[in-house]
């Protein structure tokens, strides 16, 4: 084998390796986009780099996989559904208290399901793994609840927060990740 043949073989192997690496990287990105849906774009925006965003999403998935998440037994689901209905009815007379209680109920159901109840950002990150299509609802509702405590949220804001909390609450009660929309 002469020198030129060896160089051509080495270059071909390097090009083949680069193509394989790019293909695998693309598949990993596509898998994360599919799994996390809109949360992928949210994290990309937050991190400012695809590499950091994807590392964060993979870390979340590993973290949540280690948790002992469990569905609620039927009697607990019924009890929490009843408590939620009470808060929705309470909203008419006392929207601020209903939002506080809605936030509390979501947190309580998360704890019962096995999610650690740390700071809000960690709760949202954990929820994003199995419920990526509703985690933004949780962020918006929580942000409104925080503004409400400072006296900066009107009744229409509180109504929106209640709707957003309800979407996540229903997902948590049913113990099913939201289906990714068909493309």
Image: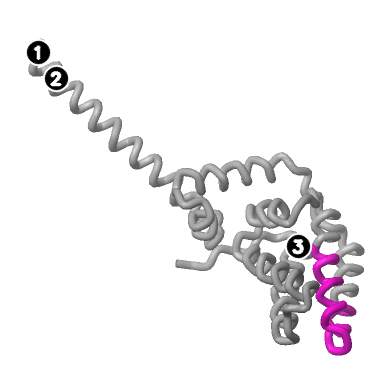
In the rendered structure, which segment of residues is drawn in magenta? 85-106
Q: Earlier in the sequence, mark 3 or mark 2?
A: 2
Report the disc number at residue 46. Answer: none
Residue with the mark numbered 3: 172
Q: Is residue 173 left or right of residue 83?
A: left
User: With respect to residue 134, does 32 lie above or below?
Assistant: above
Tags 2 and 1 in contact by the CB under 8 Å rule? yes
Label 2 – label 1 distance at C-alpha: 6 Å
Residue 180 at what x, y percent from top left?
Answer: 55, 63
The residue under the point 71% across, 39% down is 66
What residue is pinned by disc 1?
3
Residue 149 position within the rendered picture, expressed as x and y whole percent measured from the top left = 80, 72
Q: In the figure, is residue 8 to the left or right of 169?
A: left
Residue at 57 percent of width and 47 percent of height: 57
Q: Position of residue 90 (x, y in %)?
A: 88, 83
What is the magenta segment's predominant secondary structure? Answer: helix
- Looking at the rendered structure, the secondary structure element under dot 3 is helix
Between 124 and 4, which is closer to the camera in this rendering?
124
Mark 3 residue crowding within 10 angstroms, few (<14) / some (14–19) / many (20+): many
Residue 70 percent coordinates (x, y): 80, 51
Label 1 to label 3: alpha-carbon separation: 64 Å
**Residue at image coords 91%, 64%:** 75
Q: Which mark is residue 7?
A: 2
Q: Quadrant of the N terminus?
A: top left
Disc 3, disc 2: CB below 8 Å? no
- How far is the residue under mark 3 from the one under mark 2? 59 Å
Residue positioned 70% across, 51% down in the render: 122
């Amino acid at each position: 084998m002469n020198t030129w043949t060896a160089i051509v073989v080495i270059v071909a192997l390097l090009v083949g390796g680069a193509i394989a690496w790019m293909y695998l990287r693309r598949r990993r990105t596509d898998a994360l986009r599919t799994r996390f849906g809109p949360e992928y774009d949210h994290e990309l925006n937050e991190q400012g780099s695809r590499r950091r965003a994807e590392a964060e999403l993979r870390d979340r998935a590993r973290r949540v996989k280690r948790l002992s998440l469990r569905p609620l037994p039927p009697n607990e689901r019924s009890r929490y559904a009843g408590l939620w209905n009470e808060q929705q009815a309470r909203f008419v007379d006392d929207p601020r208290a209903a939002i506080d209680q809605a936030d509390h109920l979501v947190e309580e159901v998360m704890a019962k399901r096995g999610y650690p109840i740390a700071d809000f950002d960690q709760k949202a990150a954990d929820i994003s793994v199995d419920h990526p299509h509703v985690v933004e609802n949780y962020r918006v509702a929580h942000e409104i609840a925080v503004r409400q405590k400072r006296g900066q949220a009107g009744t229409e804001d509180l109504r929106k927060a209640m709707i957003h909390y309800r979407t996540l609450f229903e997902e948590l009660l049913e113990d099913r990740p939201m289906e990714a929309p068909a493309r």
